[in-house]
Amino acid sequence: MTLSHTSPHTSTQEATAFVAILRLLQQQAYQFTTISPTSHALVNSRPGNELAKNVADILGWSRPFTADVAGYELFALLKQATALSFDGTVWHSRLRVSSLSGRLFLHSAFPTSESDAIFFGPDTYRFSRAITQYLALHQPHVRRAVDIGCGSGVGAILLAAQLPQAQVYGVDINHQALVIASANGTASDLLNLHWQHSNLLQALEGEFDLIIANPPYLVDASERAYRHGGGVLGADLSLQIVQTAKERLAAGGTLLLYTGVAIVNGKDIFLQELQSMLRGSALQYEYQEMDPDIFGEELRSPAYIQADRLAAVVLTLHKSPS
């Protein structure tokens, strides 16, 4: 496994601690399913949930805790990872750990308010399902694959595990995401992974047999990188990825894009732009609405005042073999 660029804010000691935390939790059979931020806040607000009572409360629910609840070994590793803050009474972890497909993944603590936060949630599980279903159905021959905007590295890691013959790249503009993704990949004992700081595919050369992406797709007033899609109702980054795939897919290659779209007066804004972009192209696509109603709380924001709903969709874009 290679990491082409490490964060200037992350030491080797911290990166080693990230992996050690995951290995310790693996030994403890830790599991946690991360839910939406709205649901997470609701559960944490219930009486009795003010303080952590166990490791899942600390690293899953992001509840404040005392050192004895964490246990000596975990507390020491969190400290080595500089993942702790102390408010004078209790400790807080800046990391969370979630389980997916039998693996554990580090990502940012709740709430993910920082500009460089590493998000993991229901979208991640849907993205994972889309990848697994595509690979099972098509059993593609892949020599070179890339996960654009890899975040915690889930997509790249799933590809590397299921396509051991392929060289798999994870790219992101967030240095800290690459460090966390690298730790997640190392803890999964995968050797065919490569991590690269890159805006889309600008820092990588050559073509790819498989491109996957789960990009930010919301309109975020603070324009946080992990959340803001830009353009018309958050669709711009997803459309940029489609354009990149048009240029960088190998013959016979595929783009698998999981994203969210705004439905306005019954019309899918992203799909309309996509069809215009692909008009006259030899590329073929399949388009599926996976979930008709996500992030419903966003409909309160001015950006979505005209939207009926937000939906999760999967685009599969194929390039002809010849």
Image (spheres, rainbow, N blue to C red):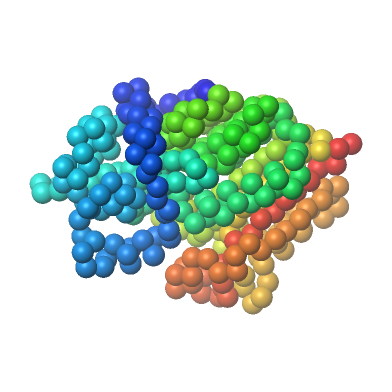
At 76% from the left edge and 44% from the top edge, which residue is drawn? 138
For the residue pair 116 and 41, the one nearer the viewer reads as 41
At 28% from the left edge and 52% from the top edge, which residue is drawn? 57
Report if residue 179 is visible in the image. no
Report if residue 186 is visible in the image. yes
If the image is split into quadrants, where does the C terminus sit? top right
Identity of the residue furthest to the right in this view = 322
Quick check: 295 left or right of 109? right
Quick check: 213 left or right of 33? right
Residue 261, position as x, y percentages in the image? 60, 62
Tell me: residue 263, above or below residue 287: below
- The quadrant holding residue 213 is top right
Residue 56, position as x, y percentages in the image? 31, 49
Quick check: 38 left or right of 77? right
Q: How many marks?
A: 0
For the residue pair 99 and 172, the one nearer the viewer reads as 99
Tell me: residue 92, above or below residue 144: below
For the residue pair 60 and 54, the one nearer the viewer reads as 54
At 64% from the left edge and 51% from the top edge, which residue is drawn? 130
At 70% from the left edge and 60% from the top edge, which residue is drawn? 288
Residue 95, position as x, y percentages in the image? 33, 43
Residue 195, position as x, y percentages in the image? 53, 29
Quick check: 64 left or right of 254? left
